[in-house]
Amino acid sequence: MTKNKEDNSPKLPIKKRPGSSWWIYGLIALILLGMPMISNFGVGNEPITYGKFEEMIRNGLVQKVEVINNIEAQIYLTPQGVTELE
């Protein structure tokens, strides 16, 4: 009776690299922390005066206005308004 060569070969232990799964957690954390910055990229949230707001309306640059809390409002511009104010 002969044994296969595979059975006689010594078994080598599989070594895991330390911290090999931690880079996945780090990548997920970076994505979660970076998403708010990416989603607001290009969005201008700068305050303007009421006079500037009236001027934008007269020039036809405003598409929609949403009043948030009777103090602030979000102004949505037309495509012409976006290019003109850049």
Image (cartoon, rainbow, N blue to C red):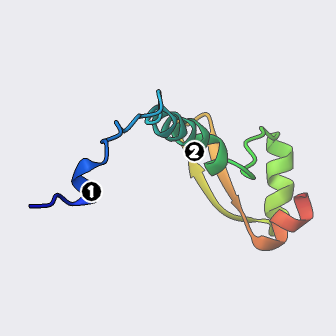
Q: Residue at (87%, 56%) from the top-left corner?
A: 55
Q: In this view, does 73 lie to the left or right of 26?
A: right
The amino acid type of the residue labelled 1 equals Glu
- Can you tell which mark lies on residue 44? none
The quadrant holding residue 68 is: top right
Identify residue for label 1: 6
**Viewer-side residue, 63 vs 44:** 44
Mark 2 burial class by Cα count in 10 Å: few <14, some 14-19, many 20+: few
Residue extending farthest bottom: 80
Q: Is residue 25 above or below residue 35?
A: above
CA–CA distance in space, label 1 to label 2: 52 Å
The C terminus lies in quadrant? bottom right
Q: Is residue 82 above or below residue 47?
A: below
Give percent across and percent down for residue 63. Answer: 68, 67
Q: Can residue 59 be seen in this view?
A: no
Give percent across and percent down for residue 27. Answer: 54, 40
Q: Can residue 77 be seen in this view?
A: yes
**Number of numbered markers:** 2
The amino acid type of the residue labelled 2 equals Met
Q: Residue at (75%, 52%) from the top-left corner?
A: 42
Q: Residue at (77%, 38%) from the top-left corner?
A: 47
Q: Earlier in the sequence, mark 1 or mark 2?
A: 1
Q: Is residue 79 above or below residue 67?
A: below
Label 2 SS? helix
Q: Residue at (31%, 42%) from the top-left corner?
A: 10
Label 1 SS? helix
Q: Which of marks 1 and 2 is in front?
A: 1
The quadrant holding residue 13 is: top left
Q: In this view, does 65 lie above or below 15?
A: below
Identify residue for label 2: 35
